[in-house]
Image (cartoon, rainbow, N blue to C red):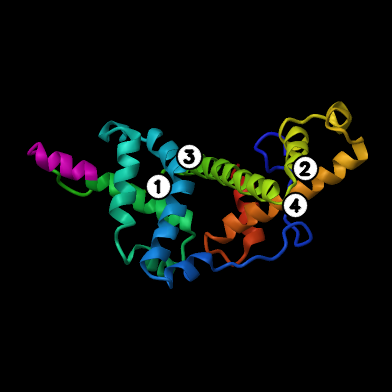
Amino acid sequence: MSGSGVTKHRTGGDVFPATQLSWIDQRLEQGEQGRSDVNRHIMELYRFPLSVYYLGTRDRWLGDVDEVINGFFADRLARVSFLGDWRSSGLKLRQWLINAFCFYLREIKRARRRDAHEDVGQAEDMTVVPALAKQFDKALVAAMVRKAMSAAQTDCEGAGLAAHWQVFVLHFCHGRPYHQFAQDMGVDAARAVVMARTAKKKFQVAIRDIIAREGQGDVDGEIQSLLESA
């Protein structure tokens, strides 16, 4: 898992076992609490990618990045129809959010100009900038990996496999050969390989679960798409 932390992951079914693909739908059926869960997930996962996109635009003068991103989430996620409209659109969630964010930036700009009594004229073209969308996708992959790492670590520690997680991090994240650290952990290199494999499977399940939450039926295809973007 050197570099981005995901480049060594294959996308075959033997690596990523099947998981539930309708997490968002399930939560939305649970009313306000379910909507809160979905909104929290979106804010946690997409705050960093949207910040990267915003800071790359010519409109970053509109305000502090945290202020703008918080305003976007507060405005859009408060709308009961927002996620339903996404479902009807057929777009991937990340595409829906970045499009909505561009519209939000245009709304802020027009409001500022009205307050300054400037002629707003025709609506500005605020379509997604392809180069920035690429940076957004890279940031999203990083955010997904961080979230999956946290979930997998918690899972390992809860199962009494804290040492397994440590071996996984040392080998896959820091690139250290097993023989360099196995003895210090009281195991041989062969045992360290098995320990790392156990933790790696938990990470793979976690990253797949996060991607499945985006509502895409073809999770393996979505994994490949994100890896190519990164």
The three-letter code of the residue at mark 2 reads His
Residue at disc 2, secondary structure? helix
| Residues at marks 2 and 3, CA–CA distance in whole angstroms | 39 Å
Furthest residue toward bottom: 29
Residue pointed to by mark 4: 201
Residue pointed to by mark 3: 131
| Residues at marks 3 and 4, CA–CA distance in whole angstroms | 33 Å
| Residues at marks 1 and 3, CA–CA distance in whole angstroms | 9 Å
* Camera-nearest label, 2 or 3: 2
Q: For the point 58% across and 67% down, which residue is it?
A: 21
Queried whether the magenta region covers residue 160, the answer comes back as no
Magenta residue span: 108-119
One can see residue 83 in this view: yes
The three-letter code of the residue at mark 3 reads Ala
Mark before the other along the chain sequence, 1 or 4: 1
Residue pointed to by mark 2: 164
Asked whether disc 1 touches disc 3, contact meaning CB atoms under 8 Å apart, the reply is no
Residue at disc 4, secondary structure? helix
* Camera-nearest label, 3 or 4: 4
